[in-house]
Image: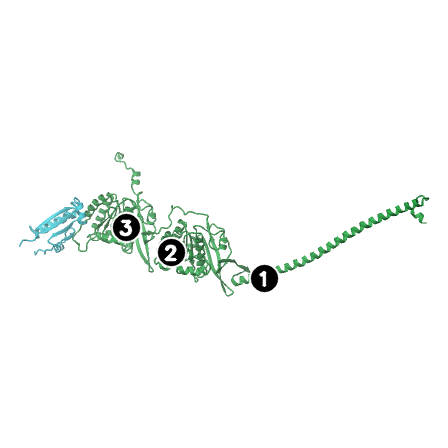
């Protein structure tokens, strides 16, 4: 059985503080829980504002989990790990 | 050294800055603020739920898109744009026509399944808006229900930061911004605790809407809290959400062109009343008729309306007490026929009992209907209804605006006002105190005397016209309304039957005197005739005597002549005698 690949898209706004924190949090999470099972696409809405408009992203940072289904959105710096995991569909690691 | 740098041209700054205003197209609001919202600046609009924030905001955008050639963007944080468009179709703004290029809705309302973790910012939205604004050349932007998105932010500092971000962005792009936000019931205390508290210091203009219920009657008010660099009306102004959107009631503002004043008179419909007023009411004047119930206030209003219609002037009759058809029927009994004018469209009867709501709503409705009907004469019977329960506080202002508005539009206004029979101020002030504003004040009252109740009419004041100081008795009959002189006898005022008795006894007395006079004349005539006859017969006698006298003289002369001739002849005949005197011969 092939492992499920998690696809994420993170919308950030340049190098604003919130965006940097979110990107760091997401990377840490993926590295620890989904080693080699994830893809992260980073969209900078300051560079691609039309995309933000088209895709309805108004709060930055916004994380979209594209796969596995269902597609889910989470807004913010991804600080509360338990909450993020719940949305993404992962169980917290047993320490 | 200090002046070597860039010189600031203050005049240009001033011209480019707040002098320029963005009209909102909201009746009254543009007048309060002297033109609209500050152009290229940010305005904060706060109000409780259902206070009309979204309507205000949308009307501002529609005006921009349709009239000012300033396309706009509506950022909806609360409602889905599709729903807003549907909801606002009722105002007849035809939003869907504008949607293609001039108006854009950005759906930014957080979906219920939105999950949030940690802080975020609005830079994404602003970046998206920037693209859109450039694309459509937007000049106006509304952030509707900003509080919704701010509520998601974890702390006050973050809220403040995002508000600053939006504000800075608006300024940088020279967009005229309007941010709406909810404020709970008691605005003054709640505001300070919210991030909007400081926002009110940040923005250039702040407008507060509130919605109160007083004794079950809803009252809406708007207040401009601040407006940098502009004068504005700082009082709370009542407003109404009407058929076409917002309507802010403005008291007469300074600097507004005064109503056209004419010397033209219009008849009151009662001939003798016109005479008492020195020719009738002035055109465009406001007339107040006060009186107890049943003193024929409606009848006088009806007479005025009928006279106006007879001149061919469009007239509106607003009745609070009874139905239009009822009023017409009742007035027919005193010879005032309004039905033909209703039929040919000159007269419009409005039964205002069907209009519910605050005094303000009533005024707006009356104004709307009068404009629709292009009325030149307006009757409101009775205007005192405005001050019924729940409206005591606002009614005076409403009445004031009613008079100002009718003056400005050149409408001749006739209001009746009911005086409470139990009230102690029987012949003084009216509940609305509009008696001071009215140009002509006619007071009707009863006089109970000798088992009768009679109506008396007097003119308390009439500005600019000579007017009678007399109390007249108002008489209603099937041939119309007339005024009769009253009798004052021995310090008592006689009206009704007493007056009639007095009148008839005087009539009889004068008849008797008349007859006596006639008799005297006849007898004198007879005497005169007798004398004349006598004079004539005497005259004839005189002539006869004169003739007789002449005859006598002549006879005497001729006899004498004959005699003398006879003697000489005889002597001649005798021939011998010398002529001797007759006497001697006789011896």
Q: How is the image coloured?
A: by chain
Of marks 2 and 1, which one's residue comes earlier in the chain? 2
Outermost residue on the left side: it is A1
Q: In whole angstroms, how far apart are the C-alphas of marks 2 and 1?
A: 54 Å
The N terminus of chain B - image quarter: top left
On the rendered structure, is B518 left or right of B328?
right
- In which quadrant of the rendered view does residue B357 lie? bottom left
Q: CA distance from mark 3 to mark 2?
A: 34 Å
Nearer the N terminus, badge 3 or badge 2?
A: 3
Separation (CA) of disc 1 from disc 3: 78 Å
What number is the disc on residue B255? none
2 vs 1, front mark:
1
Q: Mark 2: which secondary structure?
A: helix
Element class at badge 1: helix
Q: Chain A shown in which color?
A: cyan
Few, some or many C-alpha atoms within 10 Å of disc 1 (few <14, some 14-19, many ≥20)? few
The residue under label 1 is: B508
> Total label count?
3
* Residue B344 occupies quadrant: bottom left
Q: In the figure, is residue B269 to the left or right of A58?
A: right
Give me the chain letter of mark 1: B
- Outermost residue toward the bottom in this view: B451
Residue B365 in view of the camera = yes
Disc 2 designates what residue? B395
Q: Which mark is residue B94?
A: 3
Q: Are marks 2 and 1 on the same chain?
A: yes
Return the residue nearer the eye: B12 or B582: B582
Question: In the image, residue A4 lies at what x, y percent?
Answer: 7, 53
User: Would residue B380 be found to the left or right of residue B3 on screen?
Assistant: right
């Amino acid at each position: 059985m092939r492992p499920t690949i998690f696809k994420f898209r993170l919308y950030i706004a340049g190098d604003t503080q919130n965006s940097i924190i979110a990107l760091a949090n997401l990377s840490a999470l993926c590295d620890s829980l989904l080693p080699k099972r994830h893809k992260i696409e980073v969209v900078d809405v300051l560079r691609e504002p039309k995309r933000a408009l088209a895709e309805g992203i108004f709060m930055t940072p916004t994380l979209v989990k594209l796969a596995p289904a269902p597609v889910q959105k989470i807004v913010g710096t991804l600080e509360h790990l338990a909450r993020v995991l719940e949305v993404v569909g992962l169980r917290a690691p047993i320490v | 050294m200090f002046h070597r740098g860039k010189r600031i041209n203050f005049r240009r700054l001033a011209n480019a800055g707040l002098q320029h205003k963005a009209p909102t197209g909201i009746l009254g609001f543009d007048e309060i603020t002297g033109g609209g919202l500050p152009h290229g600046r940010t305005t904060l609009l706060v109000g409780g739920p259902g206070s009309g924030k979204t309507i205000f905001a949308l009307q501002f955008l529609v005006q921009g898109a349709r009239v000012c050639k300033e396309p706009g963007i509506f950022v909806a944080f609360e409602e889905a744009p599709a729903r807003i468009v549907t909801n606002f179709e009722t105002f007849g703004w035809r939003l869907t026509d504008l949607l293609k290029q001039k108006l854009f809705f950005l759906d930014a309302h957080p979906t219920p399944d939105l999950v949030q973790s940690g802080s975020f910012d609005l830079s994404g939205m602003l970046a998206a808006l920037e693209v859109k604004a450039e694309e459509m050349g937007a000049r106006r932007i509304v952030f509707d229900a900003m509080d919704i998105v701010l509520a998601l932010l974890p702390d006050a500092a973050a809220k403040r930061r995002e508000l600053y971000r939006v504000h800075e962005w608006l300024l940088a792009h020279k967009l005229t911004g309007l941010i709406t936000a909810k404020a709970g019931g008691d605005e003054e205390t709640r505001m300070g605790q919210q991030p909007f508290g400081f926002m009110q210091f940040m923005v250039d203009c702040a407008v507060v809407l509130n919605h109160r219920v007083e004794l079950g009657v809803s009252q809406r008010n708007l207040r401009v809290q601040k407006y940098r660099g502009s004068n504005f009306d700082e009082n709370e102004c009542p407003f109404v959400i009407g058929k076409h959107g917002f309507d802010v009631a403005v008291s007469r503002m300074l600097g507004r062109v005064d109503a056209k004043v004419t010397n033209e008179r219009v008849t009151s419909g009662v001939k003798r009343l016109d005479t008492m007023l020195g020719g009738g009411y002035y055109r465009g004047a406001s007339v107040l008729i006060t009186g107890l119930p049943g003193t024929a206030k409606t009848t006088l209003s009806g007479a005025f309306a009928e006279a106006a219609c007879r001149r061919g002037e469009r007239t509106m009759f607003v009745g609070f007490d009874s139905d239009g058809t009822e009023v017409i029927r009742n007035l027919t009994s005193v010879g005032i026929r309004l039905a033909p004018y209703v039929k040919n469209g000159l007269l419009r009867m409005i039964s205002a009992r069907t209009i519910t709501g605050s005094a303000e709503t009533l005024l707006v409705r009356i104004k709307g209907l009068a404009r629709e009907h292009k009325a030149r004469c307006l009757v409101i019977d009775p205007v005192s209804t405005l001050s019924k329960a729940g409206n005591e506080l606002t009614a005076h202002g409403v009445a004031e605006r009613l008079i100002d508005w009718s003056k400005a539009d050149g409408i001749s206004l006739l209001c009746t006002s009911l005086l409470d029979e139990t009230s102690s101020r029987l012949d003084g002030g009216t509940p609305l105190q509009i008696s001071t504003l009215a140009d002509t004040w006619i007071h009707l009252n009863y006089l109970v005397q000798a088992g009768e109740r009679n109506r008396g009419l007097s003119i308390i004041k009439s500005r600019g016209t000579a007017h009678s100081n007399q109390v007249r008795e108002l008489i209603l009959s099937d041939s119309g309304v007339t005024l009769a002189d009253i009798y004052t006898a021995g310090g008592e005022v006689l009206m009704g039957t007493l007056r009639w008795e007095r009148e008839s006894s005087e009539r009889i007395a004068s008849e008797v005197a008349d007859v006596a006079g006639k008799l005297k004349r006849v007898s004198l005539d007879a005497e005169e005739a007798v004398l004349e006859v006598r004079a004539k017969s005497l005259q004839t006698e005189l002539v006869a005597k004169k003739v007789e006298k002449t005859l006598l003289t002549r006879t005497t002369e001729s006899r004498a002549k004959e005699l003398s001739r006879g003697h000489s002849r005889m002597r001649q005949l005798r021939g011998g005698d010398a002529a001797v005197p007759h006497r001697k011969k006789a011896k």
